[in-house]
Image: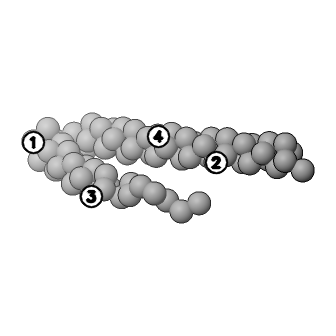
Amino acid sequence: MPSTSNDSGFILPLAVLSAVVMLYSLIIAQQILLGLIVVAAFWFLYLLYRLVLRLGRIATALEQLVEHRLDEERSP
């Protein structure tokens, strides 16, 4: 099943946001760990979002498979 959505649209803005947060934490706040925690949280939420999307696609595909098999059983 080919991908119907383009999820790469979030990667560039998230990378830019990560760079801005890291620069802020290094130059202004001078606390690199704080920046790393925030950036890691951003990327974790993004990956969690992608996981939920993929699980939804798997569930949809399984539902279609079950419907297809039931249709085959009903019509001999």
Residue at 26% x, 41% y: name it. 35
Kind of residue at disc 4: Leu
Question: Is there CB contact under 8 Å for labels 4 and 2?
Answer: no
Residue at 39% x, 44% y: name it. 46
Kind of residue at disc 3: Leu
Q: Under tag 2, what secondary structure?
A: helix
Question: Is there CB contact under 8 Å for labels 1 and 3?
Answer: no
Residue at 17% x, 49% y: name it. 20
Among numbered discs 1 and 2, the one appearing first in the sequence: 1
Residue on which disc 2 sits = 61
Question: Is there CB contact under 8 Å for labels 2 and 3?
Answer: no
Judge left or right: residue 11 versus residue 30: right
Instruction: Give the Cα separation between the discs numbered 3 and 4.
Output: 17 Å
Camera sees residue 65: yes
Residue on which disc 1 sits = 28
Residue 22, horizontal then vertical, whole percent: 22, 48
Residue on which disc 4 sits = 48
Among numbered discs 1 and 3, the one appearing first in the sequence: 3
1 or 3: mark nearer the eye: 3
Kind of residue at disc 2: Ala
4 or 1: mark nearer the eye: 4
- Farthest right residue in view: 76
Q: Residues within 10 Å of mark 2 (few under 14, many from 20)?
A: few
Kind of residue at disc 1: Ile
